[in-house]
Image: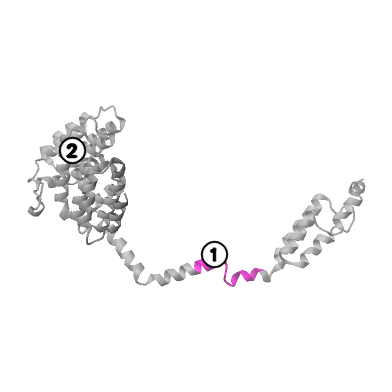
Amino acid sequence: RRALDLVYLLVNETNVRILARELLNYLMVADHEFKEDLTDKVCSVVTKYAPNKKWQVDTLVRVLIMAGEFVRDDVGSQLVQVISTAPELQIYSVHKFYHALAAERHSKQIKQRQLVKIGVWVIGEYGELLSIAPPREDNDDITGPVPEELVVDLLEGILRGGLTSIEIKMYALTALMKLTSRLDAVVPRIQKILASYQGSIVVEVQQRACEYTSLFQFDDIRKQLLEHMPTMEDVERDNGEEVEREEEGPNATTTTTSASAVVDLLAMDDEPAQPSSKPAPAAAPAATGASIMDDLFGLDLGGGGSAPAPAAAPSGGGGSSAAIDLLDLLGGGDSAPPAQPQNNPMGGMGGMG
């Protein structure tokens, strides 16, 4: 593990091809307990230091073939984004995934589910490109175009596999539905496949099959609904422009705005000094509250000396006046008026008689 960490730290733009190949070789023979951490490291260095997008796609497909069950979902999303934003790689990518899925299907056991999910999505999105042979320089393990019937055979085989998960089945149904707007010759066959799953015992599969089958009643809008997904190029371009704008000039403006916001938040300017010049309005509510409490509790029923004490307290001003009034009301002050009810506790009641 220490050697693995050391190799991971040594990877950079100049040696990523060599070290990534060594990591992939070790991934083939690594123990099961190390594969998850090793897969994360390989995907990380490939994504970070890839010399070009083709090498990135090719290497990540190899990782999916060898240890697809350990690949995180975000890596799959990044791979899909790379393919969608690189039209020159879409022919190569769809052929690469088709042959990888064909080999996985021949094993009669779907082990690399992440590979199947991404591959089914790519075939559903760019399946019409399988009829085009990939460029000669990319023709390493790919042999010519793929007939449309074989494409449907592959997806149907994955869909009807006994060990296929519900999630992958829904991916396959969606891919077949997309192909109805891309491969015209196999539309009737795909329609029959979708109709056969309208009675599925799995509610999710049945619902999706019924929804897709009903779309054939609206051929005028079906192809528009099943068009290729928009790429992320516009979003990336906008983000790049925002980053450039942030790097050029608005740093000073942002800093100034942030600084003023902090000053306002911490009240370090001269504006808070204004309320201190008008203590009378703040003191008046305290006196009013004190008189209301006096009237409510009858503090002045025993004599006339209790009322002046709360009235005289505001002359001190500020928060100390309010504190004295509060202590007077609660009986915690040292003034003489609160002591009078103790000398004659029934005086108030006598007066009422």
Image location of residue 351, percent across then percent down: 92, 49
Q: Amino acid at mark 1?
A: Leu
Q: How is the image coloured?
A: one colour
Magenta region includes residue 294: no
- Mark 2 secondary-structure assignment: helix
Magenta range: 260-275
Q: Which mark is residue 76?
A: none
Is 342 or 292 nearer to us in this picture? 342
Of the two numbered discs 1 and 2 on the same chain, state the one appearing first in sequence. Answer: 2
Apparent side of residue 153 relative to residue 26 in the rendered image (left or right): left
Instruction: State whether residue 31 is above or below residue 331.
Output: above
Residue at position x 21%, y 59% in the image:
51
Rate crowding at label 1 as few (under 14), some (14 to 19) or many (20 or more) other CA atoms within 10 Å: few
Res. 316 image quadrant: bottom right
Apparent side of residue 252 relative to residue 278 in the rendered image (left or right): left
- Mark 1 secondary-structure assignment: helix
Look at the image and tell me whether residue 335 can be seen: yes
Instruction: State whether residue 170 is above or below residue 237.
Output: above
**Residue picked out by circle 2:** 104
Magenta region includes residue 262: yes
Res. 193 image quadrant: top left
Instruction: State whether residue 22 is above or below residue 277.
Output: above
Q: Nearer the viewer, mark 1 or mark 2?
A: 2
Distance from the alpha carbon under mark 1 to that under mark 2: 61 Å
**Residue picked out by circle 1:** 265
